[in-house]
Image: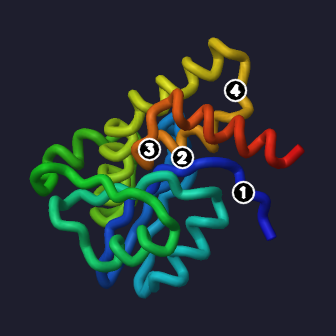
């Protein structure tokens, strides 16, 4: 079994041919894949083998059923645009990555949009932890903050857990 590498930002494009894009919390592309017959279980296995899913992006304003199910299974928030993304926009934001097909382009555009939405919060967490010399709490803190907790409360929760483990 593979050791989890860290937190992931995932974009999924469901369909007969499905695709997914995996970014790390720095916005770097880790994996981009498309295939026919990518079931929910196969998506779960392949994506979670890369790390813990922090957020999931979609390129449409109404969350597709597959993404809702995926989100429920991994406990991650879904980020969707206010309006369905236009093809031209998706082509512009993904062109430097050279996706192999429209499905990969759509999944990557969804992941990049999700990253853009959460990046300010992720940066604030890293900056706050750096100031107090507790960078090792970064992943746990980002999970709590993206679930709606403020940085101060998230730090208190993590400090209490640490004390209880002693």
Q: Earlier in the sequence, mark 2 or mark 4?
A: 4
The N terminus sits in image quarter: bottom right
Q: Which of marks 3 and 1 is nearer the N terminus?
A: 1
Q: Can residue 145 be spotted in the picture?
A: yes
Circle nearer the viewer, 1 or 2: 2
Q: What element carries label 2?
A: helix
Q: Earlier in the sequence, mark 4 or mark 3?
A: 4
Circle nearer the viewer, 3 or 1: 3
Question: In percent of the image, x 63 and y 22: which residue is there?
Answer: 129
- Separation (CA) of disc 4 from disc 3: 17 Å
For the residues bearing labels 2 and 3, Cβ distance under 8 angstroms: yes
Q: Earlier in the sequence, mark 1 or mark 2?
A: 1
- Counting from the top left corner in percent of width and height, residue 19 is at 40, 68
- Counting from the top left corner in percent of width and height, residue 141 is at 58, 38
- Separation (CA) of disc 1 from disc 2: 15 Å
- Counting from the top left corner in percent of width and height, residue 9 is at 47, 50
Q: In this view, does 6 lie above or below 163?
A: below
- Counting from the top left corner in percent of width and height, residue 164 is at 80, 47
The residue that label 4 is drawn on is 135
From the viewer's perspective, tell me whether residue 73 is left or right of residue 63.
Answer: right
The residue that label 2 is drawn on is 143
- Separation (CA) of disc 1 from disc 4: 18 Å
Q: Point out which mark residue 159 bears.
A: none
From the viewer's perspective, tell me whether residue 148 is left or right of residue 51.
Answer: left
Q: Which residue lies furthest to the right in this view?
A: 166
Q: Point out which mark residue 4 bears.
A: 1
The residue that label 3 is drawn on is 146
Number of other residues with Cα within 10 Å of mark 2, as a class: few under 14, some 14 to 19, many 20 or more: some
């Amino acid at each position: 079994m593979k050791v989890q590498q860290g937190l992931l930002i995932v974009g999924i494009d469901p369909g007969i041919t499905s695709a997914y894009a995996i970014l790390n919390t720095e916005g770097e592309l880790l994996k981009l894949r498309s295939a026919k017959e990518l079931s929910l279980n196969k998506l779960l296995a392949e994506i979670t083998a890369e790390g813990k899913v922090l957020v999931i992006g979609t390129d449409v304003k109404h969350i597709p059923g597959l993404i809702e199910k995926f989100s429920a299974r991994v406990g991650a928030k879904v980020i969707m645009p206010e309006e369905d993304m236009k093809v031209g926009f998706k082509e512009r934001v993904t062109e430097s990555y050279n996706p192999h097909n429209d499905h990969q382009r759509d999944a990557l555009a969804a992941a990049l949009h999700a990253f853009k939405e959460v990046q300010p919060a992720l940066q604030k967490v890293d900056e706050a932890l750096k100031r107090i010399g507790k960078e090792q709490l970064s992943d746990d803190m980002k999970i709590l903050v993206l679930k709606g907790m403020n940085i101060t409360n998230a730090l208190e929760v993590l400090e209490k857990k640490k004390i209880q483990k002693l």
